[in-house]
Amino acid sequence: MLEICNLQKQYPSPDGQTITALRLDNLRLERGEQAALVGPSGSGKTTLLHLVAGLLAPTAGTISLDGQRVDALREKERDVWRARNVGYVFQSFNLLPNLSALENVMAALVFARVERERAARLRAMELLRGVGLADRVHNRPSQLSIGEQQRVAVARALANRPRLILADEPTASLDRENGRNVLEILQWLCREQQSILILATHDHAVMELFPRRIELARAVEVSADAPADSVA
Ligand SMILES: Nc1ncnc2c1ncn2[C@@H]1O[C@H](COP(=O)(O)OP(=O)(O)OP(=O)(O)O)[C@@H](O)[C@H]1O
């Protein structure tokens, strides 16, 4: 289970003010639950995903996955924790350009040290077959279509069977048909392995496909000397 309590992230701004990028009082997602993360531009969707992934530390509040406090981990511990427990799908795929589709997926497994090379290869092949790319495994990203690249990225994110999949507008660079295809695969794989899925989107057609929504309100800006919640 993912549990968030009284979470806040603030940044100093260049003009001496403090920007509250995110405020989220409570959130609980059970194993296998899928939720769309929605809110206007600047409401903190990416910030929330980065906090949950342990890429950023919160200013206040707690984040726990299956009872483990992610916010309390030191930076090095967070890297190890992330490699084992989190799969991240970006809008812009972030595949390694010099590696084939197969090597990109294997890299996630080898980095997390959860599989030996032979087992990693088999798992990567199985996933790439699952996302419909069995005949493209030796292609590099530049030799794949945009939709195919995102399917490789989905396979990579799911490779370690992570408990948590975070996706930041994963269909925003795709046309409707490819977007629908990637989403179906992502939701199906998350259901299969009972991963929690949080997917940020602006697209109403995408939101409709999720049983739950996490709605963020627009971030507020407060001056440096005012308490955060005294300014609207
Ligand atoms: N490193 C930073 N320093 C200062 N302010 C930041 C930083 N990162 C994000 N912000 C601010 O925090 C707020 C939330 O940003 P975030 O990217 O999380 O929003 P978002 O909901 O994902 O937006 P979008 O839908 O446009 O992608 C914004 O006002 C942004 O300008």
Image: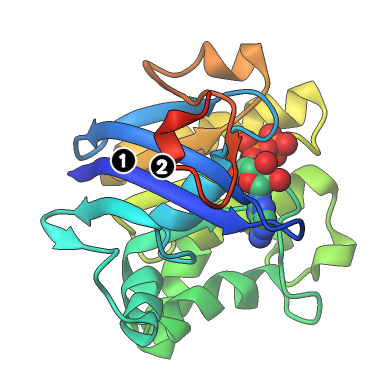
Check the picture and name the quadrant holding the N terminus. top left
For the residue carrying disc 2, how many other residues have a C-alpha within 10 Å: few (<14), some (14-19), or many (20+)? some
For mark 2, give the secondary structure. helix
Name the one closer to the observer, 55 or 99: 55
Looking at this rendering, what residue extends furthest in the front direction? 225
Give the amino acid at mark 1. Glu
Residue 133 vertical placement versus 36 (above, below): below
Residue behind label 2 places its C-beta within 8 angstroms of ligand 1:
no
Could you say where residue 89 lies in the image, as x and y percent from the top left? 58, 52
**Residue indicated by mark 1:** 192
**Residue indicated by mark 2:** 189
Residue 158 vertical placement versus 37 (above, below): below
Evaluate whether residue 43 shows in this view. Answer: yes
Name which residue lies at 34% across and 51% down.
164
Whether residue 150 sits left or right of residue 109 in the image: it is right
Could you say where residue 15 lies in the image, as x and y percent from the top left? 76, 56
The CA span between labels 2 and 1 is: 5 Å
Name which residue lies at 48% across and 26% down.
36
